[in-house]
Image (spheres, rainbow, N blue to C red):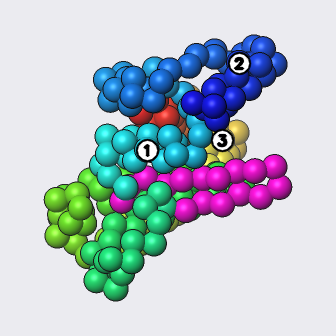
Amino acid sequence: KQSGGMFLGIGREIAPDYPETTFDDRIIDNTAMQLVIHPSEYDAIVTTNMFGDILSDLMAGLVGGLGVTGSANIGEDCAVFEAVHGSAPDIAGDGIANPTAVIRSGIMMLRHLGETRAADAIRQALQDTYSNPALLTRDLGGTASTTQFADALYKNRETQKRGILAAQWRDLALVAGVLVGLYLAFDSSAGAAPVGHYLVAMLPIVAYVLLRMARQRVVRDIEKVRSMDRIR
């Protein structure tokens, strides 16, 4: 109680220095229960190492287990990213470990380094892999090995890259269509009626605008999913 009381006292002392943060305190057993019943009420928990270890394992169990939860230790000059479960020596070499925790730790590291696009790409490939129950590892009720899971993640990332390349070529084709349409609209030697020229010019322009609007909607939907993930 002496060390815990000192920790709490310091928290109360410095809380006014951060007016944008709502300060509250609870004993450990009530906190554990509230995390199970009302997890969305918590944003950040500041606690001691022992209580933090207990609560992090509890919260890992709420979202699938230690095999799917990454962690970050961020200081002023350096940061360390690792799986919550540690090295898991009891299953080392068996090919049954779930690599998700390590992958999600890597995603957090990429975001910390400012490599947002790379983090988003890996995160999407991970979600695509989880969408197929046959690719889940044993801890999640599947039968896939560590290597099979990793291979599926790699293939999903390659599928993403091909999709991005196809989208880039589609955009290029639309831009080319706009330029051709504009040329026809203003080239008097084309032979067609001016109204027809303008219609030809407008079609690719409209298609391009619709495509951009659809992409913006997809981006908004992705941001909604990410915000839900942060709440969970």
- In the rendering, at what x and y percent does residue 120 appear? 54, 52
Q: Which residue is mark 2?
A: 12
Say which of 166 and 45 sits in front.
Answer: 45
Query: CA separation, marks 1 and 2?
Result: 23 Å
**How many numbered discs, if any?**
3
Q: Which residue is mark 1?
A: 54
User: Residue at (32%, 77%) from the top-left corner?
Assistant: 90
Say which of 196 and 178 sits in front.
Answer: 178
User: Residue at (71%, 57%) from the top-left corner?
Assistant: 79
Q: Residues within 10 Å of mark 3 (few under 14, many from 20)?
A: some
Inspect the magenta stretch and tell me whether residue 13 lies in it: no
First-in-chain label (1 vs 2): 2
- In the rendering, at what x and y percent does residue 213 appear? 51, 32
Q: Amino acid at mark 2?
A: Arg
Q: Amino acid at mark 3?
A: Leu
First-in-chain label (3 vs 1): 1
- In the rendering, at what x and y percent does residue 172 appear? 59, 55
Question: Can the viewer see residue 125 in this picture?
Answer: no
Is there CB contact under 8 Å for labels 3 and 2?
Answer: no
Query: CA separation, marks 3 and 2?
Result: 67 Å
| The C terminus - image quarter | top left
Q: Nearer the viewer, mark 3 or mark 2?
A: 2
Q: Residues within 10 Å of mark 1 (few under 14, many from 20)?
A: few
Q: Which residue is mark 3?
A: 182
Q: Where does the magenta region start and end? A: 67-82
Is there CB contact under 8 Å for labels 1 and 2?
Answer: no
